[in-house]
Image (cartoon, grey):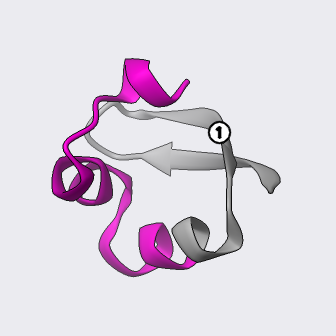
């Protein structure tokens, strides 16, 4: 598990999340918003 700041262009700001390395790779490929939609989550649920 790693704590990272990730910029979300839809929100226009950075969010700090605690992620697995696998989730971090997926987010870097598709973007934070797309990753959360694919998993059926909202940003409030993961913060």
Q: Does the magenta stretch include residue 46?
A: yes
Q: Along the line of sight, which residue is nearer the eye, 25 or 12?
A: 25
Left or right relative to 21: residue 39:
left
Secondary structure under badge 1? strand
- Expressed as whole percent of the image width and height from the top left, the position of residue 46 reads 49, 30
User: Mark 1, residues whose alpha carbon is within 10 Å: few (<14), some, or many (≥20)?
Assistant: some
Q: Is residue 19 magenta?
A: no
Q: Along the line of sight, which residue is nearer the eye, 38 or 11?
A: 38
- Residue at the (80%, 56%) spot, across then down: 1
Residue placed under numbered mark 1 in the picture: 17
Left or right relative to 9: residue 34:
left
From the viewer's perspective, is residue 40 above or below residue 26?
above
- Expressed as whole percent of the image width and height from the top left, the position of residue 25 reads 55, 79
Residue numbers of the magenta segment: 25-47
Q: Main secondary structure of the magenta part?
A: helix
Q: Quarter-wise, where is residue 35 in the image?
A: bottom left
């Amino acid at each position: 598990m790693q704590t990272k700041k990730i910029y979300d262009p839809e929100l226009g700001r950075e969010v700090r999340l605690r992620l697995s390395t696998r989730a971090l790779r997926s987010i870097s490929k598709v973007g934070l918003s797309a990753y959360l939609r694919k998993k059926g989550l909202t940003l409030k649920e993961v913060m």
